Amino acid sequence: MLIEQCRLEGEGPLAREEHYNFKEIETKWQQVWEERRSHRVENKSDRPNYYVLEMFPYPSGALHMGHIRNYSIGDVVARFKTMRGFNVLHPMGWDAFGMPAENAAIKHGTHPAEWTKQNIAKMRAQQKQLGTSYDWEREVATCLPDYYRWTEWMFLLMYKRGLAYKRKAPVNWCPSCQTVLANELVVEGGCWRCGSGVVKKELEQRFFKITDYADRLLEDLSLLGGWPERVRIMQEHWIGKSVGAEVTFSLPGQERGITVFTTRQDTLYGVTFMVLAAEHPLVLELVKGSDREAAVREFVEKCRRQHEMARPGEEADQEKEGLDLGVHCINPVNGEKVPIWVANYVLMGYGTGAVKGVPAHDQRDFEFARKYDLPVRVGGQPVGEVLDPDLMTEAVPAAGVLVNSGPFNGLESELAKDKIADYLEANGWGKRAVTYRLRDWLVSRQRYWGAPIPIDYCDSCGTVPVPEEDLPVMLPENIKFDPGVVSPLAQIPEFVNTTCPQCGGPARRETDTMDTFICSSWYYYRYTDPKNDQAPFSKEAVDSWLPVDQYIGGIEHAVLHLLYSRFFTKVLYDAGLVSNVEPFTNLLTQGMVIKDGAKMSKSKGNVVNPEEIFAKYGADTARLFILFAAPPDKDLDWSDQGVEGAWRFLNRVWRLVMGNKTVVSSPANEYSLLERADRDLRRKVHATIKKVSEDIEERFNFNTAIAAIMEMVNEIQRYLENDRQHRGVVREALETLLLLLAPFAPHITEELWYQIGHTDSIHRQSWPQWDDKALAQEEITIVVQVNGRLRDRLVVAAGSPPEEVERLALKLEKVQSQIEGKKVVKVINVPGKLLNIVAK
RNA sequence: GCCGAAGUGGCGGAAUUGGCAGACGCACUUGACUCAAAAUCAAGCGUGGUUUACCCCACGUGCCGGUUCGACCCCGGCCUUCGGCACCA
């Protein structure tokens, strides 16, 4: 019984609420699809391959609306492409390592593996409830040994290629998570996950040399025309390439000098001081034994504290402070003595940690010079201006034409950059150089729930990578969790103590685990060959699917996952393991789900639970609302009433199709003897096919696609109120309706498809094709303007000659009254569309 | 501070190449059905003016200016909101 009749209290015999039984229908088809393995896909088929992928979730416990939105969008693409004739790979998995599992273990005593497993089971069930068309036989979970074995293998690949190294470095430490964080994971000075203030710590850590790939990661952004521009720009900024020169200022009486990096070698003659970062190794050396040593030492300490306390955003606002070291270096281009200072505004982590001070042309140097009364010297005059160092109130970055610059006087600054770089190189004072803002990727974590780093330490052999055939290094299961314990693995002797793979002697295992972003940097390759136990994937499988045709996920990964994945892909490419240089051809970054003006979050108390929506309206309604409410890349305003509207629409579709079942299932399907109303409906139907196809395919504008389907439904209903109905036309209209709606609302359309007599799944049908003949207009409405303002409309037969249209338009009463007493100067005719009469 | 995106009815949004501003939905109003309500169906729904009424007119896409026969759209200058980066030499 598919129509549910609810009797309400105090009702009469006719009173009833009638709506379609989504619960029964959705459960039924989800079961059928699973039993028939409808969503299984082979790597090879006679259809062209298409890979659509949504970012796999962290199994936090339950799906939230952001997930629902992400997967609804992906499922429309997958189902649409399938109907379009592609062999579609649409997989799902779990980014299953990470801190929350460990926190739950500490809090509730559940093992991270158990907690994760339960969450996955629940979320997988929700995925199925949503009706997504995933091939679950390809599911991956990064925390399972048959996956993390290959994550470890990836680490060894990096290691072998010289891309994984260990060094002591100042790193970001989250005191609450008790672990280090990569630069990308520090958000406004806080931990990306818990928000705690991040502090700097000197620690021995492992890094991936992503900086080796900085240039390629930057260059190849130009290949990503299918990505949103803003993501490309964010990555570009994050990589932050600066082209300039390194210049060495010599120290009198010493072999060594101070090297600075500059993008403005054209201002070298404007240097009046040298500034070192507090952490610069030369600072303390240069004052050693001098009367300033104590003061400098104190200042350096102060900077260090400032650095640790400050959130990066605040650093820019900090008052510039410095101290004269009382030592000089020599500016190579003019031999001048330059005083050396130490200051808090120079960063050790960028360039060489030393900066030449050119107050006339750099605002920071200017502020510093004014504060400490250091001289200002103009190195270039902007066009049409004469700078007086004594009168300047701010730096003037545009140098214009060089002055006070010896042999380079009179040169335009861009040209001077080149000439001076030549000059530096010719004299051995420096060289052209490129610097990046991008830092190496810090990949070690002092946590338990992550992929072990497959490295052993042997007293006689040193650092020894675990041989591939011994992978995976298994995570020990019996582990105790206590709050505040750093490196839980280090507490387990059975794990730590091992034998050296080289000499067989006693060795210690690495107890840090890997950043989970490593796991997610290659998962999209594993889907192509998920059961492979000889390799992470075969090249053949990868080549048949990669690059991913359409990737869909949140913008928050613009410089995290998306940059790391690009890096991994390039390394895999260099190793000959994949043939694609970029992983994702097209990227769709979906907007947030907003309610009451803010992102849905527990702390704001504005969360709508998908389960409740499923229970009340079903998955089809949830999907339809989410896709209809806004274009996918924009933020979406949640509206309970909007959901109600989507629900009403689906019920209207249900009644429309069920009420005309007999018409539709009848065989009559010829279009002879059509009347005007019949032709009009057919025109609407075919126009809708065109609109919906283009909206999905070219623009991902699901909202307007659904609006078009709604318009078509309205028009079908109006048509059915006519006395004369053409069976073939109705049949075509209703079948088209179901086909067009199928990717959005897969369950109800499947049910109705069978209800009208079909015996094969709607999701295996071909996408309808519009017929240009049906689209042809018989009459055209011409918009008639006078002086650019709409005055009237004119209905003419299609193909009427322009002169005829013009003649008729000029005779219109409304036009006449507007041009009365004026002279018609010009008539603009946009054939078939618009006529503008210009009168003065 | 720099970079990016966005400002359209009561609300979400549409207008795809410079050519009818407000599609579609929500909310609201009215009517039909009903003893009544819900559901459903139908009609209306930017602001102001005018009219018995049909109609008609003016204004209207953050603000100011420009280009054009014609501008939500292009150009110049602002304002506001959101996002990213932040002393990057």
Image: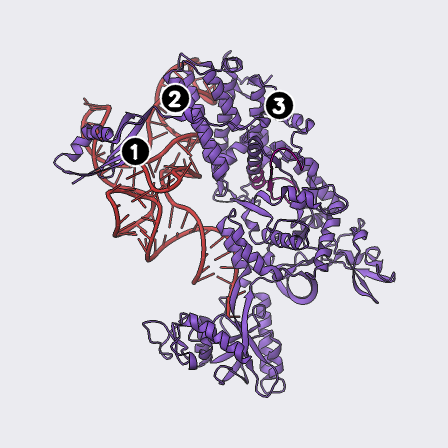
Pointer 1 local density, CA inside 10 Å: few below 14, some 14–19, many at least 20:
few
The residue at which mark 3 appears reads as: A24
Identify the residue at image location x=60%, y=71%: A304
In front: A497, or A252? A252
The residue at which mark 1 appears reads as: A831
Identify residue type, mark 3.
Glu
Q: Is residue A3 above or below residue A223?
A: above
Chain of the residue under label 1: A
What residue span does the magenta drawing correspond to? A43-72
3 or 2: tag closer to the N-terminus: 3
Q: Is residue A323 above or below residue A821?
A: below
Identify residue type, mark 2.
Asp
Q: Which mark is residue A219?
A: none
Identify the residue at image location x=28%, y=26%: A795
Pointer 3 local density, CA inside 10 Å: few below 14, some 14–19, many at least 20:
few
In front: A160, or A303? A160
CA gap, disc 1 and disc 2? 22 Å
What SS does tag 1 mark? loop
- Determine contact: label 1, label 3, CB under 8 Å: no
1 or 3: tag closer to the N-terminus: 3
What SS does tag 2 mark? helix
The residue at which mark 2 appears reads as: A680
What tint does the image give chain B? red
Chain of the residue under label 3: A
1 or 2: tag closer to the N-terminus: 2
Q: Residue A193: x percent and y percent?
A: 61, 52
What SS does tag 3 mark? helix
Q: Quadrant of the C terminus of chain A?
A: top left
